[in-house]
Image (tube, rainbow, N blue to C red):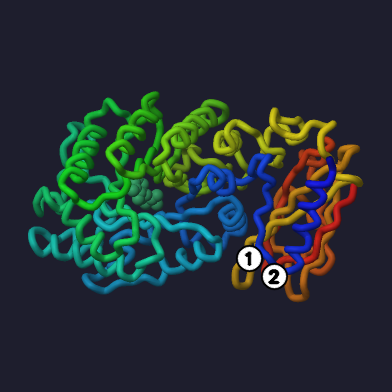
Amino acid sequence: MNRPRTTVAALAAGLLAAGTILALSPSAEAASTLGAAAAEKGRYFGTAVSLNRLSDSTYSSILNREFNSVTAENEMKIDALEPQQNQFNFTTADRLITRANEMGAKVRGHTLAWHSQQPEWMRNMSGTALRSAMRNHITQVMTHYKGKIDSWDVVNEAFDDGNGGRRDSNLQRTGNDWIEDAFRTARAADPAAKLCYNDYNTDNWSWAKTQGVYNMVKDFKARGVPIDCVGFQSHFNSGSPYPANYRTTLQNFADLGVDVQITELDIEGSGTAQATTYGNVVKDCLAVTRCNGITVWGIRDTDSWRASGTPLLFDGSGNPKPAYNAVLSALNGGTTPSSPSSPSPSSPSPSSPSPSGPTTPGACSATTSVNAWTGGFVTTVKVTAGSSGLTGWRVAVTLPGGSSVTNTWSASASATSGAVTFSNVSYNGRVAAGQTTEFGFQGTGSAPSGAPTCSAA
Ligand code: XIL
């Protein structure tokens, strides 16, 4: 019974020594990060990224650890990319592409045509001049990012909140065909990118706005206007609550022959109520085959554009909230992984190995997965308790010369360079036989390459 697990650990150690990047997740076990859990379901889990926060190490390490898709929160909007007419500034947005490549993450492009966050020159435009400026913007931006963007929000928020008709804007006043014009221009510029229409308050199937967008997509499909996906922003709060028919809405759009994506999810609230809603949103997406990814609109509550509503998955200190556990559990199909972010790391969940099941010989073993980029890395370490269980643990690694640890989560580090011992923190020292817990650290330079040693404490 011991053999498979020991073999995986030994194999992992060998591969790591060879410098291979691994995501270790034995298939019978629940994945322990949002991105890995979504990937096991053939989906991505993304976040909006604010480029100026990347220097915050807590933010940056959560980003690396949890997400496999990114959206620029503001840096790919029209005012950011084309501040003066036909003068493009891609420098900041390009840094997100670089980071996404280092993370192995997809990029959602947001957004090419929108009434909001237009540069002043565009706000002052109208008629055919504005129409051709819109086309030029789409063509130039999509050409620059050709092959690098998974899905583009070609048009954002073009519908009115009340009546199911179009929103008034300078773009709308160029003629009702501006949306299809934008999509045709986009298809010509980058035929490989998925082209999405993105909006808010389109979650409730019985709302007029939802019907308005649905009818447009249906018409586009009937007339051959190129559209591949519909983005549901899903900013939920008391004025725009998560609707019981959300899954119906997603399915009905998907049935038109487009992918559906949840693109800017945040849910105001706290505690169990917020967690339950988050879990329901994830279950709804998983129930719809063409729902291919979920993006939350920020990482920590304090990063949110609606910070006072505490609508995100991590608190201001970067700790996972109950909402995080609900999302992870839903992605894992109801299974709670034995990770530090689970409510009770040491209590076996239904599909976890029982204490009498396969166990690691000795006190414990540790395996690592590494996400490395030029000049830095994040190592995630999984500690598996041996047949006696643990009341505390230590994991020793040796960093290559010149490398150092800049941040550690769910463990405390004895040093920042050379030989470093990581010890459990108060909530994750107790691990039942055969169960696992995880911690991680981020550093500059390169990750430790040898197998870590685990001992009881
Ligand atoms: C928001 C950003 O989060 C803020 O930082 C910015 O000040 C305004 O825009 N719908 C969208 C997003 O499509 O682009 C918006 O993002 C939130 C609503």
Is residue 225 shown above or below 145? above
Residue at image location 73% in from the left, 63% down from the top: 15
Q: Nearer the viewer, residue 140 or 259?
A: 259
Q: Position of residue 356 (x, y in %)?
A: 84, 31
* The image quarter in which residue 93 lies: bottom left
- Identify the residue under disc 1: 372
* The image quarter in which residue 361 lies: top right
Does residue 191 appear to the left or right of 340 in the view shown? left
Element on which disc 1 rests: strand
Q: Amino acid at mark 1?
A: Ala
Residue at image location 40% in from the left, 45% down from the top: 263
Q: Position of residue 253 (x, y in %)?
A: 30, 37
Mark 2 / mark 1, whichever is N-terminal: 1
- Identify the residue under disc 2: 446
Q: Nearer the viewer, residue 134 or 245?
A: 245
Residue at image location 33% in from the left, 38% down from the top: 254
**Quarter that holds the N terminus:** top right
